[in-house]
Image: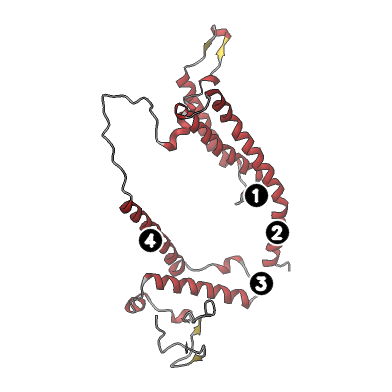
């Protein structure tokens, strides 16, 4: 974008020249090369129709907004030693909006590119009169399907003559209810304000336990396709989540002391005591 006569601009030698009314500032150079361009003050920011009249592409417009955000943040940090966290934010329009639109446009373009270059293969239509040998749900429900295959945990009661108290399917449905109930109650138990796993190692370990348990249950669901002994796979289903949970808790517990020290030091640097 070529600078207008209302703002200062630089010559090829790197010097600034004034033409017309003064009031703009020149953005910093990138990698020692040509300057980015004029950064007009807030009261002289061009409107949407002015930008449209210049016929600037989205890539150039996005770059200028990113550079202006960086320049404003750099100026703010250099002008004061006392910086509030909320002062360093930027308005939704145009900074956040342009950034989110550019990211969304990139991913949409990648999806369209992949769908055009690698179209999905369409196989033979399903035969409604032929039942497949292995019936599986969608991949994200494998963990629930695996809970239906926990027959060894269904106790056989001697008082009933060695018979099971309930059918295996009923036991699997109750197991689904218990697991979903535990997942639903965890947010009510963890009421802390921590946002990082290192700040609450216990609940981070609980999360890792749940994720690994879901993966191992998914392996139980496809045990017919696994080249592994079913008994060993069943044991690993309940052993691996415990091991991963303990390791996660131990690692985060050792990292927490140094993390909290750095966090407090950075906090007092931003908000010095009065």
User: Disc 1 versus disc 3: distance between alpha carbons?
Assistant: 28 Å
266, 84: nearer the viewer:
266
Instruction: Give the percent coordinates (x, y) of residue 123.
Output: 29, 37
User: Disc 1 versus disc 4: distance between alpha carbons?
Assistant: 34 Å
**SS at mark 3 in the image:** loop
Q: Earlier in the sequence, mark 1 or mark 4?
A: 4
Q: Residue furthest front?
A: 227
Query: The N terminus appears in which quarter of the rendering?
Result: bottom left
Q: Is residue 192 above or below residue 235?
A: below
- Residue bearing the label numbered 1: 198
Query: The C terminus appears in which quarter of the rendering?
Result: bottom right
User: Is label 1 in contact with label 4 (beta carbons under 8 Å)?
Assistant: no
Q: Tally the marks.
A: 4
Instruction: Give the percent coordinates (x, y) of residue 42.
Output: 47, 79
**SS at mark 1 in the image:** helix
Instruction: Give the percent coordinates (x, y) of residue 242.
Output: 62, 34
Q: Earlier in the sequence, mark 4 or mark 2?
A: 4
User: Is label 1 in contact with label 3 (beta carbons under 8 Å)?
Assistant: no
Q: Earlier in the sequence, mark 1 or mark 3?
A: 3
User: Disc 3 versus disc 4: distance between alpha carbons?
Assistant: 37 Å
**Which residue is found at the position 36% from the left and 72% from the top?**
57
- Residue bearing the label numbered 4: 105
User: Is label 4 in contact with label 2 (beta carbons under 8 Å)?
Assistant: no
**Which residue is found at the position 42% from the left and 88% from the top?**
6
Q: Earlier in the sequence, mark 1 or mark 2?
A: 1
**Which residue is found at the position 34% from the left and 26% from the top?**
132
Q: Which mark is residue 262?
A: 2
**SS at mark 2 in the image:** helix
Q: Is residue 84 above or below residue 20?
A: above
205, 49: nearer the viewer:
205
User: Is label 3 in contact with label 4 (beta carbons under 8 Å)?
Assistant: no
- Residue bearing the label numbered 3: 82
């Amino acid at each position: 974008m070529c600078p207008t006569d209302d703002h200062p601009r630089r010559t090829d030698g790197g010097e600034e020249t004034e033409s017309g009314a003064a009031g703009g500032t020149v953005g910093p150079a990138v990698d020692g090369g040509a300057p980015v361009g004029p950064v007009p003050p807030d009261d002289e920011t061009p409107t949407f129709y002015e930008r449209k009249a210049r016929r600037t592409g989205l890539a150039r417009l996005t770059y200028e907004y990113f550079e202006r955000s960086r320049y404003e943040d750099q100026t703010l940090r250099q002008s004061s030693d006392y910086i509030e966290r909320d002062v360093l934010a930027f308005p939704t329009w145009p900074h956040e909006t342009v950034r989110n639109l550019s990211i969304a446009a990139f991913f949409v373009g990648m999806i369209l590119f992949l769908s055009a270059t690698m179209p999905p293969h369409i196989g033979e239509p399903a035969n409604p009169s032929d039942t497949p040998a292995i019936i599986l749900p969608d991949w994200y429900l494998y963990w629930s399907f695996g809970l239906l295959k926990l027959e060894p945990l269904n106790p056989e009661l001697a008082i009933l003559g060695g018979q099971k108290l309930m059918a295996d399917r009923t036991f699997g449905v109750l197991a689904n209810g218990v697991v979903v109930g535990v997942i639903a109650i965890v947010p009510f138990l963890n009421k802390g304000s921590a946002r990082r796993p290192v700040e609450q190692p216990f609940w981070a370990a609980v999360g890792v336990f749940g994720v690994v348990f879901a993966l191992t249950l998914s392996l139980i669901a496809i045990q017919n396709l696994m080249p592994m002994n079913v008994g060993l796979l069943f044991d690993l289903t309940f052993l691996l989540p415990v091991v991963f949970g303990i390791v996660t808790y131990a690692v985060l517990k050792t990292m927490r002391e140094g993390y909290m020290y750095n966090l407090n030091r950075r906090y007092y640097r931003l908000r010095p005591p009065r």
